[in-house]
């Protein structure tokens, strides 16, 4: 039976159950945290995280993949505590979340040197624990595939080929990074069926999405509620069109929600939440999106495929 690494150890894929494939229980900058701890309220962060974990559990979720990586305060102890106290399975990533910048510790290592860092975690565990990652994370965004971003992708590819772990590639459809990311993976000889191109649902350009699907990857329709990238009605129309065209076995549905995030000063964040992303939460799918998609023709079987079967097939090793 294929299995998946979680904070509670390796679990059989049949135990994953209803899975949110892309949510964050905390998104903060780790340098900011270390240098300026007065900007952070650990207790408030914990309460937001455990409250979201319990809320999704109340909707039947059994597993949450939290693909935080370097630069997002990946913290295996925090994640384990959420899993232990909520009873959820929480699966984590190794990897680097950068749109371009690499600190000297990584800038001065080549692709194989960075792959070796990922492989160390895959073999021995994250941050000195025995808890192992379930996937490898990398990212390309507005700056596109810069030399540093390309290096991280090639490192992710090599670590994936050596370990068999799947890859989640954060993408930005507005500049069609997904196609370039898949080109790099192909050059490295990665089986495209291990790659999940996250945030593909930020566009309703079906031509782009189908070109991406032709490469053989999975796609993340994974930012429901982030209206500033694409509003829900357009995400739903795209989802229904892709279901109609038969891609149910290639898609994930999630929200990329962050229980807490430090990207803006708190007072700005309150305004942004109200004005730019009023619906964004870790339960928006269950409260609004899924009922509406069902009303418009999505079947229970299709939902089960995207939230139970596809996670098993992508993550199981
Ligand atoms: Zn994310």
Image (spheres, rainbow, N blue to C red):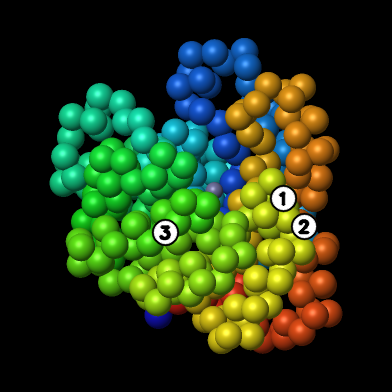
Label 3: few (<14), some or many (≥20) within 10 Å?
many
Element on which disc 1 rests? loop
Give the labeled residue for mark 1.
Answer: 227
**Is residue 198 visible in the rendered structure shown here?**
yes
**Residue at position x 59%, y 46% in the image:** 24
Residue 43 falls in image quadrant: top right
Residue 245 spot, x, y in % from top left: 58, 85
Q: Kindly report the distance in space between the C-alpha atoms of the residues bearing marks 3 and 2.
A: 26 Å
Q: Nearer the viewer, residue 281 or 220?
A: 220
260 to the left or right of 206: right
Label 3 and label 1: CA atoms lie apart by 20 Å
Residue ID at (43%, 69%):
212
The N terminus - image quarter = bottom left
Q: What count of labels does the image hold?
A: 3
Q: Is residue 64 visible?
A: no
Mark 2 surroundings: few (<14), some (14-19) or many (≥20) residues within 10 A: some
The percent coordinates of residue 31 (x first, y second) are 45, 22
**Which disc is residue 284 wearing?**
2
- The residue that mark 3 highlights is 178
Tell me where residue 238 appears, x and y as whole percent: 65, 71
Mark drawn on residue 293: none
Q: Position of residue 170 (x, y in %)?
A: 46, 52
Sequence-wise, the earlier of marks 1 and 2 is 1
Q: Name the residue rendered at 31%, 26% in the picture.
A: 103
Circle 3 SS class: helix
Q: Quadrant of the C terminus?
A: bottom left
């Amino acid at each position: 039976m294929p299995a998946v690494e979680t904070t509670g150890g390796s679990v059989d894929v049949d135990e994953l159950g209803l899975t949110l494939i892309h949510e964050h229980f905390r998104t903060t900058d780790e340098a900011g945290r270390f240098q300026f701890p007065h900007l952070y309220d650990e207790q408030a962060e914990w309460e937001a995280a455990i409250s979201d974990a319990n809320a999704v559990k109340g909707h039947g979720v059994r597993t949450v993949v939290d693909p935080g990586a370097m630069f997002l305060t990946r913290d295996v102890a925090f994640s384990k505590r959420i899993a232990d106290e909520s009873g959820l399975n929480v699966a984590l990533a190794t990897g680097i979340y950068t749109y371009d910048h690499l600190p000297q510790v990584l800038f001065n290592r080549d692709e194989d040197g960075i792959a070796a860092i990922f492989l160390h975690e895959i073999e021995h565990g994250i941050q000195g624990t025995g808890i192992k990652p379930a996937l490898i994370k990398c990212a390309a965004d507005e700056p596109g595939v810069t030399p540093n971003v390309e290096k991280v992708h090639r490192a992710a590819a090599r670590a994936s080929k050596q370990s068999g772990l799947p890859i989640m590639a954060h993408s930005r459809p507005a500049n069609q990074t997904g196609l370039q990311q898949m080109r790099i993976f192909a050059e490295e000889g990665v089986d495209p069926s291990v790659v999940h191109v996250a945030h593909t649902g930020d566009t309703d350009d079906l031509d782009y999405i189908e070109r991406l699907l032709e490469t053989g990857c999975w796609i993340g329709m994974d930012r429901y509620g982030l209206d500033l990238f694409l509003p829900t009605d357009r995400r739903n129309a795209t989802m229904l069109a892709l279901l109609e065209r038969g891609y149910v076995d290639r898609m994930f549905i999630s929200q990329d929600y962050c229980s807490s995030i430090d990207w803006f000063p708190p007072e700005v964040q309150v305004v942004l939440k109200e004005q730019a992303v009023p619906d964004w939460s870790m339960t928006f799918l269950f409260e609004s999106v899924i009922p509406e998609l069902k009303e418009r023709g999505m079947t229970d079987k299709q939902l089960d495929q995207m939230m139970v079967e596809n996670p098993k097939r992508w993550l199981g090793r």
